[in-house]
Every structure is written in C-alpha cells, then in structure tokens.
Amino acid sequence: MSVFKRGFIFCLFFSAAGMGGCKKLVDVGAPSSSIITSAVFSNDATAITAQLSAYAKLMSYVFYFDQYTGLSSDELTNYNTSQVSIDIYRNTLNAPTDGGLNGLWSVWYNIIYQENSILENVPLSTGMSTRVKQLMMGEAYFNRAYWYFQMVNLFGNVPLVTSTNYLINSTIPSTAAAQVYRQVVTDLQAAQGLLSSSYLDASDNTGATDRVRPTTWAADALLARVYLYMGKYDSAAQQASLVINNSSMYSLVTDLTKVFKMNSQEAIWQLTPPNGTLYTYDGQWFILIAPPGGSSISNSAAISPQLLAAFEPNDLRMANWVNSYSQGGTTWYFPYKYRSTNVTATSLSEYYMVLRLGEQYLIRAEAKAQQHDLTGAAADLNTIRQRAGLPPTTATTQADLLTAIMHEGQVELFTEEHRWFDLKRTKTVDSVMNIVIPQKGGGTWNTNQQVYPLSSNDLLLNPNLTQNPGY
Amino acid sequence: MQLKAKTWLVMRLTGFLLLAAMLQVSARGRAQTVTYSAQSAPLTKVLAAIEQQTGYHVFYDDADLLESRPVTVELKAVPVQQAMEMVLADQPLRFEILGNTISIARKLRMPESKMAAPPFADVHGRIVDEAGVPLAGISVKVKGTERGATTDADGKFELKHIDPHAVLVMSGVNIEDFEVKLKDKTDLGTLTARLKISSIQEIVVNKGYYSVKQRENTGDVTVVTAKTIGEQPVTDPMLALEGRVPGLYIAQASGIPGAYSTIRIRGQNSIANGTNPLFIIDGVPFPSISLTNWDVTGGAVGYPVNPVSQANTFSGGLSPFNNLNPADIESISVLKDADATAIYGARGANGVILITTKKGKPGQTRTDVNIYSGIGQIARRIIPFLNTQQYLAVRHEALRNDGILPSATDYDINGAWDTTRYTNWQKVLIGNPARLTNGTISLSGGTVNTQFLLSGTYSNQIPEFPGNFHDQKISILSNLNHTSVNQRFNSFFSVQYTIDDNNVPASDFTGSVSLAPDAPAIYDASGNLNFQNGTFGNPFALTERPYKSLTNTVVGSLHLGYNILPGLKIQSQFGYNHEQMNQTNQTPAASYYGPPVATRRTNYFASTYTTNWSIEPQIDYARTIGQGKFDMQAGASVQRNQYNSLGQSASNFSSDALISNLASAATVTALGNEVTDYRYTGLYGRVNYSWKSKYIVNLTARRDGSSRFGPDKRFGDFGDIGVAWVFSDESFMKNTLSWLSFGKLRGSYGITGNDQILDYQYLSAYSASGTFQNTSGLAPNRIANPNFAWEVNKKLEGGLELGFLNDHIHLDANYYRNRTGNQLVGQPLPAQDGFTSVQANLPAVVQNSGFDAILSTTNIKSTQFSWTSSFIISVPKNKLVSFPGLASNSSYSGTYVVGQPIIGAYKGYHFTGVDPQTGYYTYQDLNKDGLFTSADRTFMITGIQHYFGGVSNTFSYKGMELDVFFQYVNQTGRNFLYNFSEAGPSNFNVPAYYLQDYWRKPGDVAKIAKATETGGSQSASYGNLYVSDYAVSDASFLRLKTLALSYHLPKAWQQKAHFQNTRIYMQCQNLLTITSYKGYDPESQGKSLPPTRMITIGAEASF
C-alpha cells in the first residue's frame, strides 16, 4: 500500500463527499432543445416563429377537411379500406373508435392552445415592438376564429376555450354553437383592426409576394363566410364586397388551370406545402396514379357519380379541374384543381388555397338573393359562370336563384370543404343524403349524422362534455 | 444538519489517523543495513562491527557468550534483523530488537520459543464433501495469521513454510467451517467437509450499500442465483425471474425477441408514472428505459408510450434488459420493503433490483465453455380459424344482416379474389420454427489477493416469423478484483459490453392472422410479392420492411475501499454507463403494390444515447461492545444522466438498394431531437445495532434531490426503521421447541419516494416545430406546472422466518402494506386543453397490500439422491384508498373508483347478453335514457393478478439433475373477444369456435352478436364491446415454465479428457400451458406473438 494510493482514495472520497447535497448538483437549467416561454416572447424574431409553427401544423392537417367532408357528403366515392374512411363515407361513425375523428380534434385544440398562449404572452412582453405585437395578436385572433369556425361546423357544440389555464379549461362544457359563432365574430373583428393589409414575410415585413399569411382581407373574407352561415346577409355581402372591390390585389383568374397556383390573383390566403415538399397534399392524395384502393389516404378516393353529373355540358371546370385514370375498362375521375403530385412535381408551383375570391362572389350572390336583390345576385353568379365558359343563369325567382347558386357552389368549390357545410347550413342535407347514403352502402340516413361524434375519451375526461345526439 | 456534522467528525478523525499512519511508514524507511564478511571471527568482534555500522546498541551478558562459536559470514547490505539472524544462526543464542537496541541472551530450552526461528513445514491435503466430490475454492487459513490457500478443482491445497504445529481453518460458502491441528503432519490426506444442509441463515445478502447475513437481516430481500437464471433458455434476464420471486410480477408483452416486459414489485404504486423498480448493476444505476425512438417507432416491438423515454415509464419498445447477458449474472437480489429500499430514498418506492455479475475465484486458471442450441414454436396456438367455406358463408350472412351488397372494396367476396383458395395464415405467418443459439466462453482464476474473469457470449434468436429476422447479441464481461496483502485495500473494476443487433419486422405478423382465408397467393408466378392488382394488402410485404436496431451498451464500475482501522472503512463506488441505439425502419418500393415510386421509398433513422455516471463515497464503521455489535454507515450519491435522441425521416430514394443510406434520400426531415439532462444527489446514513445477534435494529435515513422537480420542490427526506428478533435463540424456545431450528420475527416501516417522471415538466418552454416561410417555428412543449413534488410511498411490513427440523423446512412469509400518496401523474386532460396531460400531484392514495411467501424444503438428502422443493406465492391487493374530487371534478372519473384496484383499470359498460331477438350485444343502461354514455360506464374492469407464483422441484441422483418449475398466475385480462370478435368486416377472419357461439336467427341464445360488416345503425353495439366487461375474462394459467435436465459425465471420463464439471443438458422454457383462456397467450393477452416454447440442448465443460 503506497502513500500515493492512500492519498488518492482520500482525495476522491472527500471531493465526492463535499459535493453531496449541494443544490447546484440538481440544477439542469433548460434543455438545449427548447427555449423557456418568457424567452420566446422576449423579442420580435422568436415571437414570430411561435406563430409560424401554427401555420406549419395547419398545412399538415387542413387537407383532412377536403377529404373527410368530401367523403361525408356526395363529392367522393371511397375506396379506402381503413375503418375510419369507411365509417366517414357511410356515415356510420362511432364514438369509441372514430370520435373526434381519430385524434384530429386534439391537434386542432393544440393549435388553439398555441394561439391562446400568444394572446396571453404577447401583451406581457417587454422586448417586442408595438407593431409586431399588434400583428401577432391579429393573427392569433384570426387563427383562433378560423379553428372554431371549422370545429363548430364539423362537431356542432364544442367547448369554447379561450385561455391556457388547464384548471379552468378541463371542465368547460360543450358550448352552444351560437356562442361559439359570437366568439368567432368577435375574434375576426378584433383581427380586422390589428392585421396588416399587405402580405407579411417571415420577419413580419410587409410587401411579401407569398400570400401565405392572413391579412385584413383574409379577415374580411372569412367574416363574410361566417355571416353567411349565421344568416346575417347584409353583413356578409358587405364583407365580401370589401374583398371584391380591392381589384388591385384580387381578381378572378381566367385561365382555370392557374387558379390554384402559388400567389394567384384569386388567392386571399394560401398555405405553403411543408418544407421541402414540391406539391400540396391535395395533389398528392387526390390525383390517381393507380386504381384507387388501399388503406392509405392517398390514391383511395374518386369523384362521385353525383358530382360528376352536376357539371353542365361544356363547363370548363370539368375540363380543367377534373381528370381521370383508366385501367381495364374502368375509368375513375379525380379532382385536378391541384396538378402537382409527389410523382410529377419538379419545382414548387402550387400552394394550398384556404380562402379565394371565387367563393366571395358566391357568398355575395347568395346574400343578395336572400335580400331580394335578384339582379345583383344573378350578376355575381354570372361572373363565376362566365369564367367557367357557361351562359348566364336562367333563374329569375329568388328560390331558383338560390338553387342555382347552391349548384354553382357544388361545381365551383368542390373538394374545398364547402359542399358538406353548405348542405348542412341550407338544411338540404337530409334530402340529399337520404338518397346518397343508400347508394354509398350505408343503410338509412339519420339527421343526427350531420355532426361528427366527439371522442369517448374526452367525454370520460371531461364529465361536462356532451356527446352529440345519436352517438 | 445532524448527519453532516457527524460525517465531518468521522472524516477529520480519519484524516488524523491516516496522517499518523503515514508518519510511521516514514520511520520504518530508515532501517539500517549491514555489510560485513568474516572467516572464523570471534562473535564479539562481529557484534562490535554491526554496532558500529548501524548505530544500534548491542547488549549482552558476557557469560552468555561463553558457549559461542567462531563466526563465518558474508553480509552485503543486509537488514539488521536478517544480519543478526545469519550471525547467530548456529549459536545457542537468541536476540531481540527493541527500538535501536539489540539484546542477546542464551536460548531458552523450550521447543516453542517464539524468539527462535521455528522450523518450517510444507503441508498439503485435499478436501472433499461427504459424497467424496472434491470441493474447489475452499479457503484454508493458518489460524491467527493472514496466510492461507484455496483448494483447486480437485480439492487439493498446499501451504509452504508454516509452523508444523499450527491450526488450519477451512471455510467456504457451502461447508460448515472446521479446523485441523497439524501436529507435525505434512500430508493431511483427504479431509471431509460437511456441507451445510440449509445455509439460508448464513447467506450474505446484498442490500446494495451494505451486506448482512440473512440471519440478521431486518429487511425483505429475495435472491435468485446464477443456477436458476442459467437453466432457462432466455436472452433477457428479467424473463428468468418470472414466478421465482414472491411479490415480483413480470409479464412478457410478446414473444418477439427483445420485446419489453412489465416488471412490478408488489403492485402498482403510482397511478400514472414510474412503476419500474430501480436497477443497480454492480453498484451502478442502470437506466431501465427503452431507447427505442418514439418518432421512428420500434417496429413490431412497439414504442415507448412517452415521446421522451427518459422517465422509466415505458411500455413498449426494446427492453433495456435485453442488453444484459444472463450468462454474466451471478445473482439478482430483489429488495422489497422499506428496510431494504429506504436507503435508496427517492428511487426506492418501486423496489430495487440489484444485479451482481460473476467474478473470478482464486485457484487455477480455468476455462468454462457452455453452448446450447434449440428450436421453438409459439407457446400457444389458436384452434383453427374458419376455413374458406365457413368464412364466406359468414361474410355473406353479415352483408345480408346489414341489408347491403358487396362493395367495391369487399374483394374477398365481390369476385376479385379466387374464393376457392385457402391459406392457413396462422401457420404461414407465425408457425415457422423459432431458433435460439447461445455460446459462452469464460476464463477466470487468480490468487487469494487478485482474481479476474473474462467472458464472452454470443447468442442468436430467430422468431417464428417468415423472412430474415433475428436478434443477435455479443456480450463481453471482464472484471478484476484485488485485495492488498495486508487485506486493507481492496478494489474492484468491471466492464460489461454488449452489442445487440435486433432485426424485427415493421409490425407484428400476428396482427394479420385473421386475414381472409381466400386471400390471394403470397407470391406471383415470377416469385414477386403478389398484391393482386392492389386489392391485397399482402402481409408478406413485412418481410421487406425490416425494423433494425443496433445497440451498444457499456456498463463500467470501479470500487475502491480502504480499511483505515479495524472496523473503520472508507470506500467509493464510481459508475459509468453508456447505451447507444441506432435504428432504421425502412419501407422500400418493393413492399408496395405498383410501379416503384421514389417518394414511396421511406426510411426512418434514429440515433439515441443515454450516458449515466455516478459517484458514491461511503464510510463504514463497525464496533463490537460486549455482546452488542454496532454497524454504521454514511455516504453520498451524485448522479447524472444525459439523454439524446434524434429521429429523422427520409424519403425519395432513387433505388431500394440505397434505402439504408441517408445521404441518398432526396427528402430528409428531422422528426425530433430530444435532449435531456437528469441530475440526482443524495446523502444517506445507517445505524444498525445487533445484540447477541438476537435483537436487531436497523435505521436508515436519506435526503435526496432530483432535477425533475421545480426549483422549490427538489429535495425530500426519506428513512426507515427495521427490527428483527431471532426468537429461536431464546432459551425458553430452545428448551420447549427443539424441532424449531430457526425463528425470526421482523418488521419495518419507512418512507421512500418516486421521481420517475419526464424531465423538465415544471418548465414552461417552446421547442422547434415545423417550418413555414422557410423559417423554423416554435411551439409550446407542454402545459407546465412548477409545483409538483415527490410521490411518497409509506411501506409497512411484517415478516416471519421459520426453520424446522434442522432447517430442512424453511418458511419466509411476509405481510406488507404500501401506501403511496401525493401521486405524481401525467394527469390526463381532455383534448380541449390543448395537451393530453399535465404533470401534477394528485391528493390520491394508492394502497398495495398483500401476502407473499417462500417455502423451501429439503425433502430427501442423501449422498446419492436429493430432492428439494420450493413454493412461492404472492397474493397482492391493490386499491385506490382515497381520491378527493374523483367523481365530481376529475379527469380520472372515467377510469378509477375509490376502493377498487387501479391496475389495468377502467370503467366500462356492463354486458347483459346478446339480444335473442335482434342479435346485438346489449349493455346495462343504468340511467334508462336509451343511450350508452359515460353515465352507463360504471362497471369496474381491471387486469389485476389475484395471486401468482411458482413451484419448483429439483431432483438429483448421482450426476443427474432435474429441475421442474411451474409458474402460475390467477388473473383477469382481455379475452379473445377483444381481439377476435368481429366476423363480417372484409379480411377479418375469426377463430372456429365462433361458429358455435354466434347469433343466427331470432330466438337464438348466443354468446356472440350476429355477423355484420358495418354494424349499421347498431355499430355502437359492437364498438362498446371493447369497453365492456365482456371483453375481459379469466386469464389464469399454469405453465410448465422450465424443465431442465442435466447429466454430469462420470469423473473418470472427465479426468481422461482433462475436463471438469462436464455436463450435457436439455432445457425447456414454456413447455406446457394449462389455461381456459381463449385466444393466444394469457400472459401477453394481445393479438401479438405469444411467448416461445423453446427446447434446447447444450453442453458445458471446464478445463
């Protein structure tokens, strides 16, 4: 046993013993993979990225609206073998397995949480500029309104959560749809006063080419739609006019193949595909590259016979927005509004369209018809028909005009999530689905099926939540 | 703090003593030497020269030198002591050195004079047991000295240069110590040692920071030895513990090599998190987390439920214990009660499992080789599924019931597929032979002071799946143990290294066993996968979709100890481990239908590592005062664990051949990069007092800090008191109950904690999420809560240990009651909160109580034949004792009920039979509103074990040994209806027993509802089945878990070949399962690959 050895042990022992119990030893700080919340909102640059991630999430999930509402209504024929697709298509959803549409509900509420977090943290920030604070608040109000509008239309009464405090939020009951609508209007009105009227880049500088961030015009356009759904036709027409009259920024694109291009003149708000992707999910999933089938959402649906039959002869939209795939004597038609797929795209040319001018004309046409301004209504309707290469409408009475506008919406806005919502808000859903559901192999239509079921799990976790009738 | 002050006092004392010891060493360093030569010189002259050279004073009486003879000597730098010995070698004189004086006197006429150099003897002998079998590794020591030897493989020993009148002491783990007086004998011949019949009381039990003899143990510890582990052909050592330890429940989730297991000591203490015990290997904490990446998933073995698997809350993914080699394990100690676990403080709540690796033993260097190989199949098979004819009939009936025609996607009946085909998917997908090969070679040996071991193992396990899947492992263990000659310093260094190459399919083939029996051929005419024009989701596509992981694990430990004074010892443990896993999960175009498309080629890549280091210094002091014995201990613990995982998805490969190369992907996306840091620190102390080894008190205390809590909630205090009374030593017992050879009562009460939650839950933070406008975004990580603190587990235990008839029968029975409050939960939130859970403390109390016992008996013990048995039983009870606000305002209201168990619990509908008129499942509609809502889901469903354990019998006759072990579990679990109840949906076959039990026409009294494809307006009737009590039933089983037969080759043969310990053996695992459970395995219960019934043969030899 050498002196060295003894000394060595002695030193080790004491150095280690001296460390025990020290508070510093259990302090780990923040992990390198995250930033504490107060630091996120300490300056403009990082604060903006807290909003950008919400758009990135949106881009990954917004397509489900097109797919699911298309399957639920009479737009698409399902070839997907997964149970949830079959259930949506045949309106045989059940709460234990499909409730909240398989977890999408939780993704959407996560984005709402993120917007609420921005609304709570931005006002507390001392390092952000007043201008960016204002813009971020505007976008957060706008986005929250957008999500609640979607939720209320898919699920009916939904819990209205406007803070990040889980102690309060956990037990909020299903809120009456009318109250949710009121919040949507309030949020959009707040957004109108805060948003930029010009498009923003990633640093919130104005004058960006990409139309991928909501502007005051997007708030106007969404508010027009919301008012239409609420039956406030004068306000709807007024908001739509604000957008339509801004002809320096927005005009209908005459070449139908270019409507869904990135930054098209018709785009009020678009979303870029996920980073590095050269195509939209609509393009990837709708365009058939093989006979439709399988359990993936891709390549598993085709345009329904009902939608196909709805096109008038010589409708340019049939020629330009619909394409087909044939094999073994069978032909399947598919939506072709977006033309880039994962197979064909070589460069980025299309963005996903959330709000576009075409819809605003139809909103105003319907609002005017409802207010007995039949000439004005026909004029707006004909603007859309004219672009599609069709003659002016022959409808003259209010009822006929409303039917014509509804029909125009079916062929103009197909697989853009409108059809399902339009059927429901115009209360024509029962008459249409009574015929369609048996054709889809789904038995008898029940009017309760126009809203999706909530997740059984959420109902267990929040005893105050109420399941939609019929589930 | 009291403890700290005491620690300092002891340390200062130690420092002083060390200093004193060093000074003494320096003094000895000045020893003088003598250089002198003489031819027949007078002694007086020689002594004068020595006096002059060394400065020593030489004293003698002249009269004593009268008889001296002339001296002839040659001295060259010889130390004084030796010089004097040489000078006086032939003189009738003796000498003594005291300080710097040398006294010389006339030799006394006594033969055993200590002053005279005694004559030396070389002694040898051989030790055998009563049956004449040589005993190796027996320690032979010269009484009163440190000198000794160890017997070799033949039982032989030799001692040189010892006092011919010494007494030798023989001791060993398995023998009764005995002494032999030499009395001038040099050949002791063959000595017979008496084997300990039942050495249970004398076994030294490892309790982690300290060890005690079982006799004086105040805690509850069960030890499983290498023999038990070694006779089971498994590659995950945890699987060798099933049914072997009272109170320890282990269930294999699936038979896929490397799949995780559920491991629980005495039930589930925590409602939501952290139910894993603490694992310690050779003193180093082993993170019992699965490294399987959450984003990339673990293929067929699943993935951890938590996105960050940092906390020990996995229930999926590759088992971390698959990276340990069963062949390297000497023993596994399972620590259960407060007395045994409180010294682990905040980590001890769920019990502690100590793994000790094998070490070298003193003796000749020996090589051990052990090789086995076997073949297997799934432990249980379902009786046949419907054949094509039956299946098609049911399918058509389902469509008729629904009033619909076959749709475009009903390929099995709409004409797309050949309806005359028949494939037994069960046989094709999971009916292939499983294989297991294992080989271990080790080299070990050493001296009494230094021992080493080097061991390498290769194993390869192939599951029952088609395709090329395997789990290959290479493990290396090396360790070195050294004790200084004076026995004061000891060190131990060990390194284990394991490479695990796990290759399983992307999902479990078992999921496809219910494919339509008329599904098309697997391969087309040209031998490619057949997708029948895209109509057939061919399960063999999985053979092209491997999930691969390569895991490298290093566990290193260093232990240094020094005995400062008799009874006072300082020691420190240094541990390091590093586990690195690389995963890929690939989907080449060849596994899809249709022309190869670059973007469909995807591969996921994950790289995950965890690094853990720990330092644990400790000081021990033991002292005996009269009949009482004190044992004290104080120590500190510092630990850090870093975790880093990166998951990436890659797609758009130009060719399938390039799919393993990330660089050849056109699109690469980072899925997640998790980095966490966990730090942990603690101070602990223990005081143990034992009086006459009869009354024992053991006190432990610990203060712990963990980084998993908010800054104000990091530290917690834990401790325990344990007592034991060996009542059989009381004289009144000895006199009256002579058949009672041992009796001990013990009890303990203490507080332990649990910090097994995710890191950083207290911190409100954002992390990278998505990219928009070419800019990386940030999104909130969680709903943060800075106020949660330790989960506290209060453990109470009483135990009784009894030995009868000279310990031929031994009983160890325990009653325990553990109550866990301040529940740490990832409290589930409804999705409307934005996140599905928040970390919080719940004011709820969970109680685990119960009884468990081992009864071991030596039924027959003779030199030729022996038969021993053991019976293990655990009767656990689990219930939620309190939960304020559970029903009114809690997100757990749908899951738990006060007074009911929480294990596998949820509230469901109460099944009320199949309606004989409509043929639908019906449930109790409690509030009679005609709907099935959460108000009707009140029936408690649990997956709890009512009792479980094992029965072991070991027979040995001459060289033959037979071990038979039955495992039994009485429990409820998910039944076949949960997995196989739906007849009707396309591609959904059902077991044949369906035919007898399902509803066909009004008036039928049936067990299963009518066939349906969609359920139509009654789809909820089918859907609710999964959340009703009808989906669970008895899942009890009795399993012949292990059957091991071995035969030792005759000695004579072995000696000829220079072998020892040579045996051949057959080992069977999961050989037979007796159960009424329908479906696959009652243990795994899911639609997953059942555990494997493995039969191996092997051989072992040492040379």
Image (cartoon, rainbow, N blue to C red):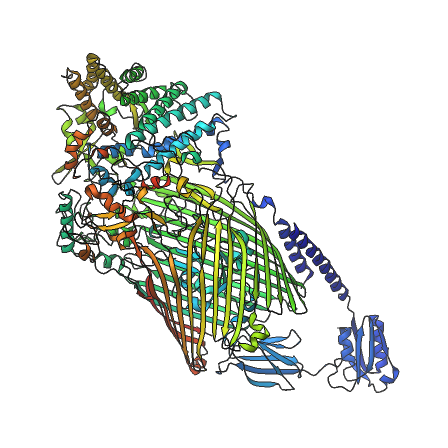
What is the x, y in percent for residue B420?
12, 54
Against A370, is A467 above or below? below
Against B510, is B780 above or below? above
What is the x, y in percent for residue A265?
29, 20
* Quarter holding residue B484: bottom right
A1 lies left or right of A444: right
Residue projecting furthest to the right: B62
**Front residue of B92 and B286:** B286
What is the count of numbered marks? 0
Against B520, is B709 above or below? above
Q: Residue at x 20, y 49 (%)?
A: B915
Can residue A294 be seen here? The reply is no
B525 lies left or right of B758: left
**Front residue of B794 and B1075:** B794
What is the x, y in percent for residue A402?
19, 20
Against B394, is B134 above or below? below
**Front residue of A188 and B1023:** B1023
B223 lies left or right of B543: right
What is the x, y in percent for residue B993?
20, 58
Can residue B193 be seen here? The reply is yes
* Quarter holding residue B935: top left
**Front residue of B922 and A305:** B922
